[in-house]
Amino acid sequence: MIYDAGTVTPTDEATDKGSSTRMDSSADVIRSQNTWNRPVFLIGFMGSGKTTVGRTLARILDRTFLDTDEMIVQDQQMPITQIFEKYGEPYFRDLETGLLRKLEKDLQETGRQETTIRETGREETGRQEPDLQEAGRQETDPSGYVISVGGGLPLREENRVIMKRIGIVIYLKASPDTLVERLKGDTSRPLLQGGNMREKILSLMEKRDSFYTQAAQIQLFTDEMSVRETARCAARQIKITVEKIPQIR
Ligand code: S3P
């Protein structure tokens, strides 16, 4: 059984359907209460909509969007297929873990810097520029990121632990049919090249679903929702979840 009972589905989010005024005002409320100091991570299988939903969610929350694949491609100056070919998958996985470690360090340093400045009574926030700036971002506070992570990143235990420790983790679920439809003809994902795409997806999903589930505090089943509906649903679920978890600073 791939989808568990804890997943939020469109039925749970019935108010989303046909009520854009209501949705817009709820998004405003969420934005105005967007004070939690944790990055939001979007995880899930390739093609589950992490990047598109992440961009929209970042807009709704007025936060900065990052994508680990894009950051790695930019850093390595080559596409993911080439990184896999030239250096192998373990090298790529180490780069993913490196990004998370860096993010956690930046968060800790930002927190320390803020505390020191508050103690000395100076007025300015004095937040440090995170090194994630190397990826060309303008955000000054890493706790304000919405981050879409590569589909294989949550498979490493260390990555799951870091994400949950520092952030709010949302698992975007989609059915195999939806994934096959979205991913057909894709040439950018090395793990799906050659052979039967559906079989590859089914076999990887089987191995990965429990890791995604372990990694996430929120699960959303996205098949029946538009990108916008999914993002709004995610924003509401974050608000509920954030009240239950301790702050990181
Ligand atoms: C991968 C997913 C890809 C990318 C790489 C490996 C995976 O990211 O990181 O091709 O192992 O599932 P998306 O999930 O954004 O497609």
Image (spheres, rainbow, N blue to C red):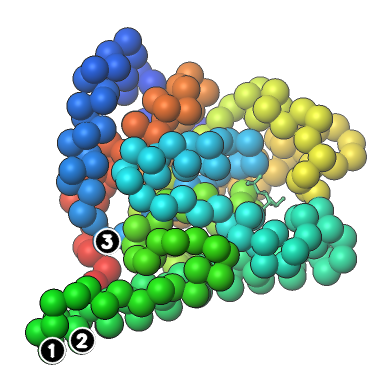
Residues 127 and 80: in front is 127
Q: Which residue is mark 1?
A: 120
Q: Position of residue 168 (x, y in %)?
A: 36, 54
**Could you say which quadrant of the image residue 20 lies in?**
top left
Quote the CA–CA distance across marks 2 and 1.
6 Å
Q: Quadrant of the N terminus?
A: top right
Q: Which residue is mark 2?
A: 116
Q: What SS does tag 3 mark?
A: loop
205 with respect to 218 (left or right): right
Quote the CA–CA distance across marks 3 and 2.
17 Å
Crowding at label 1, few (<14), some or many (≥20) Cα neighbours within 10 Å? few
State yes or no: discs 2 and 1 in contact (Cβ < 8 Å).
yes
Q: Residue at x 22, y 39 (%)?
A: 30
For badge 1, the amino acid type reads: Thr
**Could you say which quadrant of the image residue 189 lies in?**
top right
Q: Which residue is mark 3?
A: 37
- Vertical order, 12 against 47 (above or below): above
